[in-house]
């Protein structure tokens, strides 16, 4: 079977081919200027790429490529282990000296019951020069009192003070010598009463003498 060759009138002329080629080249150039250059290189000579957002995309692409290239050229950083910090020497605070413990002075409350006409005596054992603060009072009525001491070797009487018809008395007793110092009370009323004596200070013993 023999192939049929189209007549020469059916083939495009040279002018038509040149025209088509020129149009294709123009279209390609237009695409290059309006699309390729803005999208790939951020170059937008016509401004169309900016309107379409292609210029921004191209600049972003170029910036990312530049950062990747710079990162590839930077030397790798290796972590260097840090040596532990040396321990800090601490100095213990100096010991705090506790204040000396001061012994509390002796204190007592002594009660003496007296019948009508009865007398009783309470004495403190004290060193010479020792001091004792005292106060006494009756629950009712009045008494006579004698605050004194008897010398331990000679037995000589040493008086500190006397009183009659008193319901209360207070003061400071200073021992004139080492020995016993104290009070003698006598009830001169017609009813039973109680004397309450409070003492505080430097003494070793308090005792009611029979």
Image: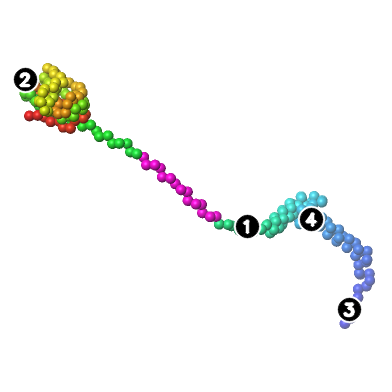
Residue occupying the point 27% across, 34% down: 102
Look at the picture and state if 159 lies above or below 17: above
Tell which circle, 3 or 4, labels the residue nearer the N-terminal end: 3
Residue matched to label 2: 190
User: What's drawn in magenta, residue-wise?
Assistant: 82-96
Q: Residue 91's image quarter?
A: top left
Label 3: element kind: loop
Tell which circle, 4 or 2, labels the residue nearer the N-terminal end: 4
> Residue 3 has which mark?
3
Q: Is residue 166 left or right of residue 42?
A: left
Tell which circle, 3 or 1, labels the residue nearer the N-terminal end: 3
> Quick check: can you spot residue 208?
yes
> Residue 37 has which mark?
4
Look at the picture and state if 72 lies above or below 204: below
Whether residues under marks 4 and 2 lie with C-beta atoms below 8 angstroms apart, the answer is no
**Structural distance between the alpha carbons of marks 4 and 2:** 137 Å
Q: Is residue 87 magenta?
A: yes
Q: Percent x, y for residue 175?
A: 18, 25
Whether residues under marks 3 and 4 lie with C-beta atoms below 8 angstroms apart, the answer is no
> Residue 77 has which mark?
1
**Structural distance between the alpha carbons of marks 3 and 4:** 48 Å
Tell which circle, 2 or 1, labels the residue nearer the N-terminal end: 1
**Structural distance between the alpha carbons of marks 4 and 1:** 37 Å
> Quick check: can you spot residue 167?
no
Label 2: element kind: loop
Is residue 58 or residue 20 the one in the foreground?
Answer: 58
Label 4: element kind: helix
How packed mark 3 is, by other alpha carbons closer than 10 Å (few <14, some 14-19, many 20 or more), is few
Q: Percent x, y for residue 150?
A: 11, 25
Give the overall secondary structure of the magenta segment. loop
**Structural distance between the alpha carbons of marks 3 and 1:** 74 Å
């Amino acid at each position: 079977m023999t192939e049929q060759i189209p007549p020469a009138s059916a083939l495009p002329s040279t002018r038509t081919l040149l025209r088509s080629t020129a149009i294709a080249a123009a279209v390609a150039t237009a695409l290059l200027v309006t699309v390729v250059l803005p999208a790939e290189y951020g170059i937008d000579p016509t401004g169309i790429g900016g309107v379409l957002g292609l210029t921004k995309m191209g600049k972003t692409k170029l910036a990312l490529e530049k950062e990747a290239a710079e990162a590839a050229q930077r030397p790798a950083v290796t972590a260097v282990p840090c040596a532990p910090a040396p321990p800090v020497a601490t100095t213990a605070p100096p010991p705090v000296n506790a204040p000396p413990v001061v012994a509390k002075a002796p204190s007592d409350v002594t009660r003496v019951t007296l019948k009508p006409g009865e007398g009783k005596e309470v004495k403190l054992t004290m060193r010479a020069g020792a001091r004792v603060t005292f106060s006494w009072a009756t629950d009712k009525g009045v008494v006579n009192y004698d605050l004194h001491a008897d010398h331990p070797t000679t037995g000589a009487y040493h008086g500190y003070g006397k009183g009659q018809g008193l319901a209360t008395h207070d003061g400071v007793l200073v021992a004139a010598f080492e020995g016993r110092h104290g009070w003698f009370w006598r009830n001169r009323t017609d009813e039973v009463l109680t004397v309450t004596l409070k003492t505080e200070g430097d003494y070793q013993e308090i005792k009611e003498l029979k």
